[in-house]
Amino acid sequence: MPGWTRRAALAALASAAAQGARAAPVAGTALHEAAFGLRLGTLEDETAYWARFGYAVAAEGRLSALQSLVLYGLLSDVATRRLRHVSGAGAAVRLMAWTAPTGAGAGAAPLFAPGARFVASEAAQLSAIERHARAAGAVVLGPIEAALGAPTRPWIDRAPGVRRLVALDPLRRRVFSEVSDGETALPAAPPGTLPTGPVNHFGAAVGTLNEADFYADVLGFIRTAPTPQQDGAAFAQGLTVRQAAFRDAAGLTLTLAAVEFGAPKPVRAQPGDLGLSLFTVRTPDIAALRASALEAGARQVSPVLRNEFGEEAVGFFAPDGSAWQAVAG
């Protein structure tokens, strides 16, 4: 057998063996939390901010600097709160107050700066949210409107559209969507809150979509097409953006976005940094997910440890460089 033929055959056998050894995705894994890094002493203020959007404290916890070093990779005490929307739906919010934050995070960097993230919610009073965001000094993009379909019988049928607003500030990166002339099933807003739904969409800007299969192969997410509410291309500001969209076992969604040419300067947003710095998933089999993540090329995969809330957890960086934590449950 010629040398090149033998090498090709061996490579094919090795590839087939690797494919056979690949761990299966863990069924039932779902998007769980968006985590925001804070400075110590600002936890109450940030809790009050999220209370305006219908979130309330559901759990509190703490890790020592040594515990944080093993789970998160930095030597800093952290005091954490988990907030849940009063409706009981959607994703939770995790507020992480570090005694020694490591960086500024993505801040108000462009929406598609590689390494940056955002979360999205539905809203019923986009104009009020816009006024608050501008008064707070946030970078505001939009509102931008898109049709959700043309009526067959104008003036008789509905002609729904969606208006979206991006608000970027040093601690929060949020997208709000308001459906007009359609049906938006928002929970009843408690007194003193803005009429918004829970976080129901996660977005991450990455350098390339070459590693996007990780989210299907390991987390078991289902590939979909971005809906008008999820599609961030309208805010690309002249850039060419490619996207990969996913839906989890609970119906929450994730979009990865990569700029083809002229991408903004990359940013670092990972545990220990300020602002939106970590996404978490909840999984019924933490050990299987850890093994699958390792097999698929995840980096800095921690042992199974107890997090701030006493839950079994694993921290890792996906092959695209995004920081994640898996929580048992």
Image (spheres, rainbow, N blue to C red):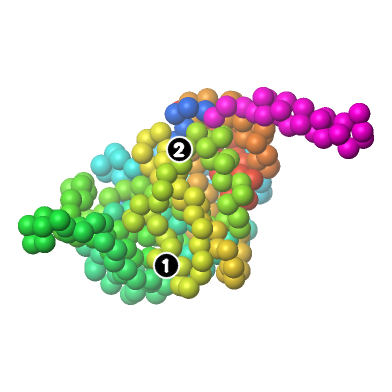
Left or right: 312 with respect to 47? right
Q: Is residue 248 above or below residue 205?
A: above
How far apart are the alpha carbons under marks 1 and 2? 25 Å
Left or right: 80 with respect to 134? right
Q: Give the x, y percent position of residue 35.
A: 48, 49
Task: Please state the extent of the stretch shown in magenta in the rendering.
Answer: 1-25
Q: Which mark is residue 217?
A: none
**Res. 221 visible in picture:** yes
Per the image, the residue denoted by label 2 is 222
**Res. 189 visible in picture:** no
Toward the viewer: 227 or 185? 227
The secondary structure that most of the magenta stretch takes on is: helix
The single residue placed furthest to the left in the displayed view is 156
Left or right: 15 with respect to 276? right
Count residues near mark 1 (Cα–Cα under 10 Å), then give few for <14, some for 14-19, many for 20+. Answer: some
Amino acid type at mark 2: Ile
Q: Residue at x 53, y 40 (%)?
A: 215
Q: Give the x, y percent position of residue 174.
A: 39, 60
Q: Give the x, y percent position of residue 232.
A: 42, 60
Q: Residue at x 42, y 72 (%)?
A: 139
Q: Are marks 1 and 2 in contact (CB under 8 Å)?
A: no
Q: Is residue 294 magenta?
A: no
Quarter of the image where the N terminus is located: top right
Amino acid type at mark 1: Phe
- Please identify the quarter of the rendering in which residue 49 is found: bottom left
Q: Is residue 181 above or below residue 253?
A: below
Per the image, the residue denoted by label 1 is 235
Q: Residue at x 49, y 50 (%)?
A: 244
Mark closest to the chain's N terminus, 1 or 2: 2
- Please identify the quarter of the rendering in which residue 85 is found: top left
Quarter of the image where the C terminus is located: top left
